[in-house]
Image (spheres, grey):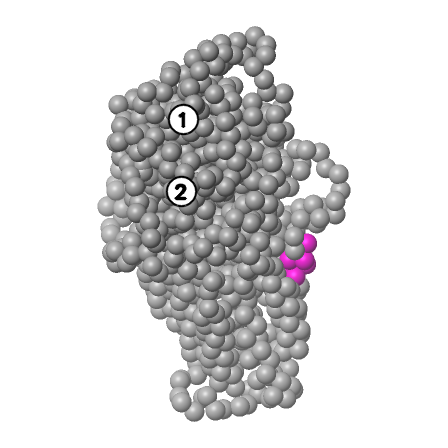
Amino acid sequence: MTDDTTARTSPWQRVKPLLPYFVTIALFAAGAWALHHLLAPVDLRSVMAQARATPAHILLLAVLTTAASYMTLIGYDWSALRYIGKRLPLPVTMLGAFLGYAFGNTIGAGPITGGAVRYRIYSALGLSAYDIAAIATFGASAFGFGATIIGFGALVIHPHALGHLLHLDPATIRYGSLAIVATACAILFAIAARQSEITVRGIALRPPTPGIMAAQFVFTAVDLLLAAATLYLLLPPSDLGFPTFLAVFAAAIMAGVVSHVPGGVGVFETVIIAALPPSVPVEQAATGLLLYRLVYYLLPFFVALVILAVTEFRHASGRSLPPFVQALVRSISALVPLAIATMILTSGVIMIISSLIPPTSEIAEDLELLLPTAILEGGALLTSAIGASMLVIAHGLLRRVQGAWWLAVLALSGGIATSLANGLDYERALMLGAALLILLPTKAEFFRTTRMTRDVFSLRWTLMMLGLLGGLLVVLVFAQKATPYAHDLWWQFASDQSAPRALRAALLGGILLTVALLVFALRPGTLRHAPATPEDLERARALIAAQPDPGANIALTGDKCLMFSDSGRAALMYRIQNRSWIALHEPFGDPAEARQLAWAFHDAAYAANARPIFYAVSAAHASLWIDMGLALIKMGEEAVVPLAGFSLDGPARKRLRTTHNRALRDGLTFEMLEAPVAPETLEALRPISDAWLAAKSGGEKGFSLGTFDPAVLSRAPIAVVRHHDRIVGFATLWLTDAHHAASIDLMRHADDAPSGMMEFLFTELLLHFAGRGYAEFSLGNAPLSGIEARRGARLTARMGAFVYKHGRQFYNFEGLRAFKQKFDPEWRPVYVAVPPRANILAVATDIVTLINGGLPRPGRARKPRTKAERRTS
C-alpha cells in the first residue's frame, strides 16, 4: 500500500474488533471440553440407535410443542408492535417473527441476526430502522427479564435443581434466587412507574404500559414452558419433576445466550447434562439433546428455508402479485444469501462428520462387510472432500457469487450420489436432496461474476474456520475413542476398520480445504492503493461521460484511488485513512457491474481488517448497503432543482425575478465558457480564487471537494459573471454526455462583487440549462440538513441536528439551506454507510482528515481551500 496511514494503525486497533470472536471461541472451547468429559462413557452407535428407536408419538409431541413455542415467539413481535404504536397485517408479523427467530436461533447472535431479518421484512411496509431496533430491543429485554424471573423463581421452589453445578446448600440457592427475582420485579415496577424515556444501547424507549408488560410476560412464560417441554419429552423418564427441570432449562438457555456461541452449542448441553440427576444415563441424555437440536432448531430453520425457496420460485415465475406482496417478496429475497450460505455450510459439516464417524445403522454395518474395501475407502475420502469444498463454497454464496451457486449445485448432487453409494445413507441423501431443491429457485439472487472468494484469510473467517475444524477434531476423537491411536492406523485398509478410514478422510478434507483457500486467496489481486494515473483518469473520464450523474466528475481531480471492475465498465473512487476505507459516492459506469464492484470493495476492506465506508451516497442504493450489513447515517440533503418548465414567470418567482432584474440593471452579465477553457482565462480567474481563499480560513479542501487546479478546470465549462466587462465571479460545472443533469463544483467571487451576484449566477445557470433541455440541476449539499432531533433518535442524529442549529459560529448551515431554498429545489437525503459497530467518532475523524488534508498529487502543490467551499459543492 502506498498510503502510509494504514501502517500507523496500532496492533490493538486491529485486534480490538475481534475480541468478541475470541471470547466466543474461548467459551465454545470451554463448553466443548466440559462436554467431552461428560460424554466420555457414551457410545455413538448406541446414541444413534436410541435416536432411531424413539417412539413416533414422542417425536410428534415434540414437534407440536416446538410449533406452539414458535407461535408464542410471534407474540414477542406482536407485543412490541403494540408497544411502539404500529400496526402490521398479522401474516406479516407472523412471517417476520418466525423467520427472525428461526434464523437467529440457528445462526446465533439472535438479536442481531433476527433484527436484520425483521428489518428487511418490516421496512418494506413502512417501519423505520428505529422502529425495528425498538422491536428487537423490546424482545431481547422481555426475554431476559422473563427468563430471569421464571428460571430463578423455579429455583426458589426447587433450590436443589442446580445442586450438582453450584455446590451450594439449598437455603443459599433459594434466598439468592429470591433476591434476584425481587430485584428483577422491582426494576420492572420502576420502569412501569417511570414517566421519562429509557435509553438502551443508544435507543430511547418509553416505558411500556402495565398491560403490555403483563401480556409479554405471559408470552415469555409460555414460550419457556413449551421449549422446556420439548426437551423434557425427548429426555428419558426420571424422578426430576418438570418444575425442577424448568429451572435447569432456564439456566442452560441463559448460559447459551451469554456465551454468544451460535445456538449455544456445547454450552447448553453441558449445563443440562451436568444438572441432571445421576439416575439419568448420560447416553440417553445425549440422545435427547441431539433430538432436541434437530426438532427445535434445525426443523424450524428448514421450514424457513422452504419459505424462502417458495418465495423465490413465485418471484421467478413472473406471476402478477399485489404491490404489498411484491414489496414483501423483495424484502424476503434479501435474506437468501445468508440463509443459503448457512445451509451449505451446515451440509458441508454434516458431510465431513459422516466421513469421520463409524456406521451407525445396521444396513451400513452390513454393507461395510459386503462392499469392496476400495469403494469404502474412496467413498469416505470423496465424502470428506465434498464436505470441505462446501465450506469454501458457502463463503462465496454469502457474497452472492454466481459461480458459487453452480458449485453448490454440483457439490450437493455429488453428496447425494456418494451418500447412496457409500453405505446407502438415504437419510443424508434425503437431507442433501432437500437442500438442493431449496437451492435451485434462488439462482437469481447470486449475480456477482467476481472470483468466488476474496477475503478467505480475513481474521473473522479464519477464526470461524479454526473453530469449526477444532469442533470436527473433537468429533473425530469422540467417535473413534474406542480405537487407541497408533501410527500404523494410517496404513491399515480393512472393511471392518473405520478409525483408519476416518483419519485419512480427515487429513484429505483438511488438505483440500487448505489448498482451496490458498488457490483462491493467493491469486494476484487487482486492487492497488496508489493515486490514479493519467491512464486511469482517462478510463474513468470515458465512463463518467457515458452516464447521467455529473457528480462522478469528482473522480477526475486526481487525489483519489480508482478501482475498476474486471471488465473496466465500472469504477469506484476511494481513499484509505487509518482503518477506514472510504469510497466516495456510489460506483459509476455499468449499473450491473457497479453493484458487483461495491461488493468487491466491501470484501477487500474486510480482508484487510478495515471498515468499508461509503460516503455521500443516495437513498437509491439503500438496499445494496443493507445487504452488506451496513448502517445508513444521514449526513445532510442535496438540493436538486427540476428544470422542466423552469422560468422566472409567474407569482411564485416574483422575488427571484426582482433580484435578477436588479442585477441586470446593476450591470451584471452572464457568460458560459465552454471547454477547453483557455489558459489565459484561467489565469484571469486565479486572483479571484486567491482573494477568496485569503479571506477565508481553512484553505483548500480535497477528496469530496474540487480545487482550483487549472489542469482539471480547463476540461470543464465555466460560468462567469462580469460587472462592466470585469469578471467578478465564476462557477465550475460538472456535466456528462447524457445531458440529463448538471451540477456546480467551485463557486468563487471577488470581495467587491455587487450584492446579489451569487443569486444572479445561480438563476442564470438554471435558465441556461433549462433552455438546453436538461432535466435537473444540483445546487450541492446542505450539510446536516433534514436531520431530526426528535426524542428517541440516534445519538449521531441528535448531535448532527444540534450542530446544524447551534453551529453558526463555525458554519452557517441554516443560512446555506435558506439560500438554496430560494430556488424551490427538491431535497434529497444524503447518507454515509458504515459498519453497524463502527466507532462513529473515528469514522468522522477519518473523513474530515481526508477532506482537510488530501493526498498530494505528483507535480502539484496543494493550495489551501476554504471552509465556505462546502456551500458551493
Q: Is 194 placed above or below 411 here?
A: above
Q: Specify whether 145 is left or right of 72.
A: left
Q: Can you tell which of label 1 and label 2 is closer to the viewer?
A: 1
Q: Quadrant of the N terminus?
A: bottom left
The residue under label 2 is which amino acid type? Pro
522 or 534, which is in the foreground?
Answer: 534
Q: Secondary structure at mark 2?
A: helix
The three-letter code of the residue at mark 1 reads Ile
Which of the labelled discs sits on residue 727, or is there none?
A: 1
Instruction: Please tell me whether the stretch drawn in magenta is mainly helix, strand or loop.
Output: helix
Quadrant location of the C terminus? top left
Q: Position of residue 279 (x, y in %)?
A: 40, 62
- The residue under label 2 is 710
x 38%, y 33%: residue: 685
Residue 846 spot, x, y in % from top left? 32, 44
Q: Is residue 408 magenta?
A: no
The magenta span reads: 434-441
Left or right: residue 719 versus residue 254 is: right
Cα–Cα gap, marks 1 and 2: 17 Å
Of the numbered discs 1 and 2, the one sitting upstream in the chain is 2
